[in-house]
Image (tube, rainbow, N blue to C red):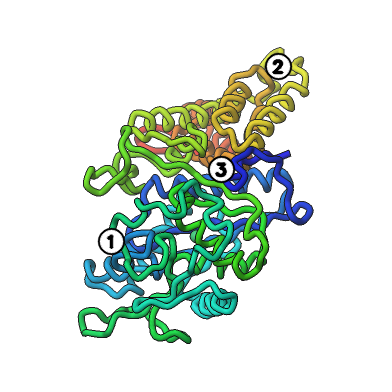
């Protein structure tokens, strides 16, 4: 049984899918106006982990993620410029070019981190019609009003508005920055924004005609429109960073539920922030690291992936290079263990056979209990290391470990083969043949030497005679 903390009920609950063994899951994706940093990726790593855990528990997961390429203003509260248009001006590109560039960059890092590709990756700009349709339905239900700069959602009319978040509806703090006087209530938000009266300078790259006039969708409407399009009016799980819990997600819920009168999602999961050396990541502190920044320091995406597991997703995580280094070393050690197991197959180690098979199963069971307990990865990693260090037969350990890696996603099999290649570690029986061939060559028995070479090749290894000696490698 998978247990998850549901932000909606503020409780850890048994996960019960709406349909047997099938899960609809939506994750709020990136706003593609700059490189996503390692704190942003923590939220996607959490979504990926959840998908893997559900799949491990035999659920078929329909995983949908969006790409925000329009409408996200500098402030989440609908003030300031559109982030894409602002970036475009700064970079001397069009907003379309900016979106394409940073979407590609995002997907490259996403793949490097071995994150599960969504079944559907949907862009806001590809779903303008769906967003307009939903705004019309909200309008028909009487929840909208018009101001000189757009169509707004009247949050005072929705009884349980903000049920997900902890704020007070009339929170004055909300209006502090760039208050929009034309809103009826501080929490009201834009569904459609009008394009500014065109001057050559203010002309937007991205704008569309709508029943209300030329403009662009508000940020929140895309997620309600696209999640319902691909997953239905009520789906199982909605995930996102904890920064979405107070504004974006309550607004997604308001837009959907004012029209359907059904819950948008049954479970809401929020991934906590990542701090850097105890401070919030910010441009001014120059501590917003991207994956590229870590790679420049010699770390890999999988090192970062391993590091993410060290903190529970609902806890703030403190990033330091020391912690990353420790994670990278642990991962390296793990791969070395696997290489060693390959080097010493069971039959060569005395006494191992006497271990009961059941022991490995115990570790697998405890690992599953940990991941199913609201994704308790530090506990799961602990169990994994206990397994690795146990004196079970190496073949049983590697089978169990590779099974766990379906959740860990550390690509352990391929990475350890790679390490073995790099280290040139060659199994003992191959090494013995190589030495025998060398002896034959010394004795000028070249036919016999060639015969051994062919034998080595049949066993999956190639040898090359170089000035520095014989090089052996796996084919
Ligand atoms: Zn969203």
Residue 352: mark in rendering: 2
Tell me whether circle 3 and circle 1 mark residues in contact (CB < 8 Å): no
Classify mark 3: helix, strand or loop: loop
Residue placed most toward the observer, 225 or 405: 225
Which tag, 2 or 1, sits closer to the chain's start?
Answer: 1
Image-based side of 114 in relation to 38, left or right: right
- Residue, disc 1: 178
Q: Residues within 10 Å of mark 1 (few under 14, many from 20)?
A: few
Residue found at x 77% / y 23%: 357
Nearer to us of marks 2 and 1 is 1
Residue located beneath label 3 in the image:
409
Left or right, 474 with reference to 218: right
Residue 429 visible to the viewer: no
Q: How many other residues sit within 10 Å of disc 2, few (<14), some (14-19) or many (≥20)? A: some
Q: Where residue 30 appears, x then y in whole percent?
A: 43, 58
Query: Of callouts 3 and 2, which one flags the residue occurring earlier in the amino acid sequence?
Result: 2
> Crowding near pointer 3: few (<14 within 10 Å), some, many (20+)?
some
Q: Secondary structure at mark 1?
A: loop
Give the structural element (helix, strand or loop) at label 2.
helix
Q: Residue at x 50, y 63 (%)?
A: 156
Cα distance in 3D space between marks 3 and 1: 44 Å
The one nearer the camera, 273 or 76, is: 76
């Amino acid at each position: 049984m998978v247990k998850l903390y549901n932000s909606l009920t503020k409780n850890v609950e048994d996960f019960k899918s709406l349909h047997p063994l099938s899960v609809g899951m939506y994750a709020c994706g990136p706003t593609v106006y700059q490189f996503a940093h390692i704190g942003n990726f923590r939220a996607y790593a959490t979504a990926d982990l959840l998908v893997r855990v559900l799949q491990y528990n035999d659920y078929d997961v329909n995983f949908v993620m969006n790409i925000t390429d329009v409408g996200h203003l500098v402030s989440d509260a609908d003030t300031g410029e559109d982030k894409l248009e602002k970036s475009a001006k700064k970079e001397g590109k069009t907003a379309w070019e900016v979106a394409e560039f940073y979407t590609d960059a995002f997907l490259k890092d996403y793949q490097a981190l071995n994150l599960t590709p969504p079944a559907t990756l949907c862009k806001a700009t590809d779903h303008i019609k769906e967003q307009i349709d939903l705004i019309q339905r909200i309008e028909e239900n009487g929840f909208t009003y018009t101001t000189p700069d757009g169509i707004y959602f009247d949050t005072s009319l929705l009884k349980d508005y903000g049920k997900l978040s902890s704020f007070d509806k009339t929170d004055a703090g909300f209006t502090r920055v760039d208050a929009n006087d034309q809103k009826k209530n501080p929490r009201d938000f834009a569904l459609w924004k009008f394009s500014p009266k065109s001057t050559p300078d203010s002309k937007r790259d991205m704008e569309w005609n709508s029943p209300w006039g030329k403009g662009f969708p508000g940020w929140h409407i895309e997620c309600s429109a696209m999640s319902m399009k691909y997953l239905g009016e009520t789906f199982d799980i909605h995930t996102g960073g904890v920064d979405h819990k107070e504004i974006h997600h309550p607004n997604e819920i308001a837009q959907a539920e004012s029209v359907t009168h059904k819950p948008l999602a049954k479970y809401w999961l929020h991934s906590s922030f990542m701090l850097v050396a105890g401070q919030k990541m910010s441009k001014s502190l120059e501590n917003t690291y991207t994956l590229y920044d870590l790679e420049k320091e010699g770390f890999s995406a999988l090192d970062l992936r391993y590091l993410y597991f060290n903190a529970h997703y609902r806890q703030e995580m403190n990033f330091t290079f020391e912690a990353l280094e420790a994670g990278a070393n642990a991962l390296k050690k793990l791969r070395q263990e696997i290489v060693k197991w390959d080097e010493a197959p069971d039959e060569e180690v005395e006494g191992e056979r006497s271990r009961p098979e059941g022991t490995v199963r115990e570790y697998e069971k405890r690992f599953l209990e940990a991941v199913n307990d609201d994704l308790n990865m530090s506990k799961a990693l602990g169990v994994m290391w206990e397994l690795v260090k146990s004196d079970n037969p190496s073949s049983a350990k590697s089978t169990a470990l590779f099974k766990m890696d379906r959740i860990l996603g550390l690509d352990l099999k391929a990475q350890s083969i790679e390490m073995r290649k790099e280290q040139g570690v060659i199994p003992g029986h191959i090494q013995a043949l190589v030495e025998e061939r060398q002896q034959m060559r010394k004795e000028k028995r070249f036919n016999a030497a060639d015969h051994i070479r062919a034998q080595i090749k049949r066993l999956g290894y190639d040898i090359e005679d170089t000035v520095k000696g014989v090089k052996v490698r796996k084919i």
